[in-house]
Image (tube, grey):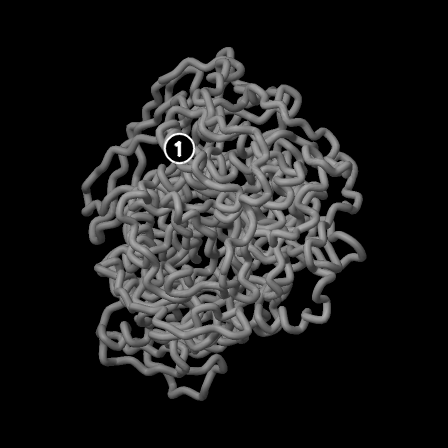
Amino acid sequence: MACRASALLLLSLVLAALGPVCHATPVNSRDNVPAGYYAAPYYPTPHGGWLASWSESYAKAQQLVSRMTLAEKTNITGGCGIYMGSATELPCVGNTGSANRVGFPQLCLQDSALGVAATDNVTAFPAGITTGATWDKNLIYARGVALGREFRGKGANVYLGPTVGPLGRKPLGGRNWEGFGSDPVLQAVAAAMTIKGVQEQGVIATIKHLVGNEQEMYRMYNPLKPGYSANIDDRTLHEIYLWPFAEGIHAGVGSVMTAYNAVNGSACSQHSYLINGILKDELGFQGFVMSDWLSHISGVDSALAGLDMDMPGDTNVPLFGYSEWKYELTRSVLNGSVPLDRLNDMATRIVAAWYQTGQDKDFPPPNFSSNTKDRDGLLYPAALFSPNGQVNWFVNVQADHYKVARQVAQDAITLLKNNGSLLPLSTSRPLKIFGTDAQVNSDGPNACLNRACDKGTLGMGWGSGIADYPYFDDPITAIRGRTSGVTFYNSDVFPAVPTPTADDVAIVFINSDAGENSFTVEGNHGDRDSAKLAAWHRGDALVKSAAAKYSDVVVVVHTVGPLILEPWIDLPSVKAVLFAHLPGQEAGESLTNVLFGDVSPSGHLPYSITKASTDLPNSVANLKGYAVGQVQDTYSEGLYIDYRYLNKMGIKPRFAFGHGLSYTTFSFSNASIASVTPLTLVPPPRSPKGPTPSFSSAIPPAAEAYYPAGFNRIWRYIYSYLPPDDANAASGVGAAGTKQYAYPSGYSTTQTAGPAAGGDLGGNAALWDVAWTVTLTIDNAGTQFPGRAVAQAYLQYPAGIPYDTPVVQLRDFAKTDALAPGEAATVTLQLTRKDVSVWDVEAQNWVVPGVGGKRYTIWLGEASDALFTACYTDTLTCESGLKSPV
């Protein structure tokens, strides 16, 4: 989402001269995209409600929506305007209109993916990238439960998370840290567990951003220039970037947010093939689709393309009271441009998601304001004149969620190197701490607006994906709490120090930041610039200086993503390296628990760390710069990102995807494989669509949408009503006028049976049939430390198939509980039909290329480059002690 802060307000004021030029200005023309990339038309929007798992909610929604007036229906499909919330009008980052007359309230939509944003008394959880680094399904779910409870406790109907786009295609991408890692399966599993945890608390989750928002620069449409086009081929789209969305939909997610950019030339917020064709038909999505903030660029076109909710209601230049929907959507239905059938489906989808999560039963109203931290404030901040009133009730929703937050931060810490078993540290050794990243920002943890600075310990990136810290447990405080022999040099320039003793240990803290394009931090416009795969604040020089002085050096890294470590990683004094990622509020004790051996580190990398940025293809390693017209970001690497590309090209990374050491060692043994479901070449025929709600098709009288007599209007507030003298309400198709709306190519109003690849939530139900299970024993083979192991299963496709496939691809993982020395645990991993399929662009279906007894190999190990056990699907045998395939 775009930033909700004074920076956006300032931007709006700067652009004020554009004024009416921005009002209802559709961006219909497209620049040419490279040959082979095409945004096909797909109409009409499939009706929601045809799946049994949502039928009860749709039946209730049909009854409620059938009682709404035209103005009430259009009111709930859009926001009332940015900064247009009060104690009674929902002071959230997004606030829909209501249909109070029939019992449907305004909905509060609230950032962020890591905690309730822009308010107090909440938990600042570790970021998505940290969560992914735990590789712990149960812990990811527990974080989702805690998030859901806090959003509900604050009265937020819609949780604007989880983030799976960006997926992490580009290491320099500014918002990669909001997601879970650079692999579709890791992203998908984490998203599904988060959605499950959140929605079980009665809060609607929103999986975002659909799709291709893999860099921040040039992402947004504006009146002068379109957002960039992510040009993605069909197979890559399905097997990489849509995979997490499909799993989120399979988990029952209630909402999807579109991305700012275009895909294959068409803006995501009005992309009929993505929304109507893939999301709602092929993937069977039953909830509602919203625009990202200020990304809505058309009225009729976006409605026909399947968008259901406009957020926050304004055009893409806000604060003038103009909208592409609300009153415009009312007018478009009255003049026949937008079929009433489409509006009914929009409203029904929104109401059905409300029922599906049980929000009709005792859901609390919002008790906070995103616009001020004071008890009292402006009721309508964006209005020129606004009354004051109470807007904050300071409800504390933290409970004991710090425990989950600390557990995530701790279990994500990834030990990359530990020469000579320097770690864990003895509290008797003198410690010399270097780097400003060791201590919380001296101005306060929340001093920088939207965390748009890199001062002190880096706990999260910047932008809309943040939450305010209730407190900040910083590393230096936690370290001092463990031992008295601490000297802290709070500087990123190596100081003059006394001659070290043989017992001295230097701990150097460095970091690397990134965030949303709404802010610029130290010259970085969201994305990290090409030099920023190095540590910020000359961190590499700080490490090298410490290594030249001390014989035992530990490097602790807080980072949004991978760094190039080559300047110092092989220095003999650099004995140990810990990636602590972005730990949120619990940065201190989570780290000292690992440093001093209370627990063994158990995190694993959610991305690869290369030796040079040029180890990845140019299309991935570099950001797209300015271009005249639409910037073209072509995914020419196809399936080959991160470890997939490195393996294909035989490039050895410094640390591979999935890498993570422990203070102990583990052995994998007794692997066995079992066939569960026999597979055919393609899934069995999809289930037919069930019945969907039906409504009257008669266009209601215009009087149904007029402002009520004596209505008190708030200036700049966006309403769905029309003035009684509106001359344009009946001038189109289906009305008395003769004007014909210029419908897009391929437009139709005839509902279809849907594609063969569809049929249930996420696609054909058979895609989730378990094909094979693999069981293995994991032993703690050490003698001193307990530890938790992560078993990772990677698939190698059969030789000789007519599809190009990566050498290996992650397909499942499992994490053990803490195992004492000599203790063992049994782990079972599974591969589904979809896991062993490829997307066939001609058949437009998932195909199992190994059908007929061809050999799939399931590789087991602790990292993508440490796979030493193989199980074979043709013989149902396994063998260990093999050479890793990469």
Q: Name the side, left or right, on which 219 lies relative to 513.
A: right
Residue at the top extreme of this rendering: 852
Q: Name the side, left or right, on which 381 lies relative to 749.
A: left
Residue 184 position, x and y percent, is: 50, 40
Task: Note whether 825 is above or below 481 in the view shown.
Answer: above
- Whether residue 652 is visible to the viewer of this picture, yes or no, is no
Q: Amino acid at mark 1?
A: Gln
Residue at the location (24% across, 47% down)?
782
- Give the residue at mark 1: 63
Q: How packed is label 1: few (under 14 Cα within 10 Å), some, or many (20 or more)?
A: few
Provide the secondary structure element on which disc 1 rests. helix
Residue 140 position, x and y percent, is: 34, 47
Residue at the location (40% across, 21% down)?
769
Residue 127 position, x and y percent, is: 41, 57
- Whether residue 454 is visible to the viewer of this picture, yes or no, is yes
Residue 765 image-quadrant placement: top left
Residue 190 image-quadrant placement: top left
Task: Note whether 780 is above or below 454 in the view shown.
Answer: above
Residue at the location (55% across, 66% down)?
715
Residue 2 position, x and y percent, is: 55, 60
